[in-house]
Image (cartoon, rainbow, N blue to C red):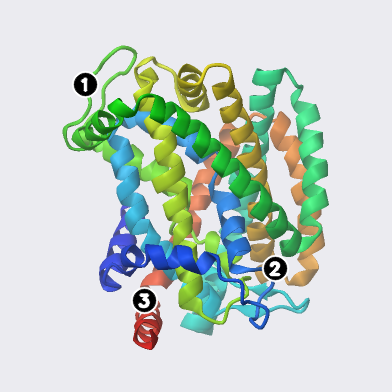
Amino acid sequence: MLVFLSAVGIFLTLRLGFFSWRKIPDAFQLLWRTEISHRQGNISPFQALMTALSATIGTGNIAGVATAIVLGGPGAVFWMWVTALFGMATKYAEAVLAVKYREVDELGNFVGGPMYYIKNGLGKNWRWLGFLFALFGTLASFGIGNMVQANSVADALQHSFQIPVWITGIFIMLITSAVIFGGIQRIAEVASRLVPIMAIAYIIGAMIVILNQADQVLPALLLIIDNAFSGTAATGGFAGATVWAAIRFGVARGVFSNEAGLGSAPIAHAAAKTNNPVQQGMIAMLGTFIDTLMVCTMTALVIILTGVWQDGANGAALSTLAFNTGLPIWGGYIVTFGLVIFAFTTILGWSYYGERCAEFIFGVKSILPYRILWIIAIPAGAMGKLSLIWLLADVMNGMMAIPNLIALLLLSPVLYSLTKEFLLSK
């Protein structure tokens, strides 16, 4: 699956002539445009990006980066970068096709995503493939987007503040229900406020640690690049890692973090107020840039600069140790609150993804039952043992990618034509 995801990203990057790299400055400029009142959609392009980011910036940026370094050495970070650079083209392609082939449902909502660009772009003979994506997406949402996130929040608050997990579960259930019953507009409004604030706070905390050891930043970056091609020797509590381990875990954590190719983010971008699929695709690819090349890099540099990656800790515990070492007293709170806010916004974002997948299969009558089930699953996840749910969620995430990647390859001529038309109009 990782090979398939990477290969599609490389193919699309080359097919589009590195469009996703060349247009990064233009994409950031598009974010601040406000003339959208005459455009069709439910939420602004900025809110669509924040909704997508709310679902991707999460435990992968904090715990996932630490795990990649522990299992693959510092060199794994390099392969996370590579995955993100090529994943930008995948994310761009997903959003372009999502806007191109979106529909308006019985309630007047703009709906789209892989299931719709499979049905409307490839034709009715391919509808079964869209059905499979929607089925896998509905099931995956309850695992990776709900119960796992609630469990992460409950665990973090129990360890940091001794709050019982059942109280955390009930509290998250109540505030989530207050948001998701307001539909995509309310989810987007909350995400557009919480995600930038928490991401900026997290990056500022990381930058303080990094700037305190500014003279070591270049050696740290050189260590990452060198270990990506030479492996990492065993030192301290670190068991050592081969080049293959760096590639494997770097790519795996990179994909988990930014979700490029899984087909989740275009479901949010399909609701954007836009008449230009290419412009929304450019905004969408910023999600991968911000998620991996910015937030994940900050986490990685803090872990490497403080030297704690050799101490034998793993996951969120390693990230907490790194921030506490580089920023005593406050560092641990940054990681804890980062985990809590990022996990909560992930619950909001994935509730929308799963709801749209369920609607594709069962129609709009499934929306209310789906939301009720979503709310009930939160305290169950907070109090449960999730080893099996983690496994099932990973499998369902992987299964989501298969129909989506097939569709991206088959619809790449349409993608190329739309991009070429956009470039000629400039």
> In this rendering, is residue 395 above or below 318?
below
- Looking at the image, residue 393 sits to the left or right of residue 376; the answer is left
Question: Which is more foreground, mark 2 or mark 3?
Answer: 3
The span from disc 3 to disc 1 (Cα, nearest Å) is 42 Å
Residue matched to label 1: 233
- Tell me where residue 201 appears, x and y as whole percent: 57, 38
Mark 1 lies on a secondary structure that is loop
Residue matched to label 2: 359
Residue 334 seen in this snapshot: yes
The type of residue carrying mark 2 is Glu
Mark 2 lies on a secondary structure that is helix
Residue matched to label 3: 412
The part of the image, by quadrant, that contains residue 336 is top right
- Tell me where residue 7 appears, x and y as whole percent: 29, 59
Please name the residue shown 56% across and 71% down the image.
33
Please name the residue shown 42% across and 37% down the image.
298
Q: Earlier in the sequence, mark 3 or mark 1?
A: 1
The span from disc 2 to disc 3 (Cα, nearest Å) is 26 Å
Assess whether mark 1 and mark 3 are in contact (beta carbons under 8 angstroms).
no
Q: Earlier in the sequence, mark 2 or mark 1?
A: 1
The type of residue carrying mark 1 is Ala
The type of residue carrying mark 3 is Ser
The part of the image, by quadrant, that contains residue 238 is top left
Task: Report the front residue among 249 and 78.
Answer: 78
Binning the other alpha carbons within 10 Å of mark 2 as few (below 14), some (14 to 19) or many (20 upward) gives: some
Please identify the residue farthest to the left as the structure is shown: 230
Q: Quadrant of the C terminus?
A: bottom left
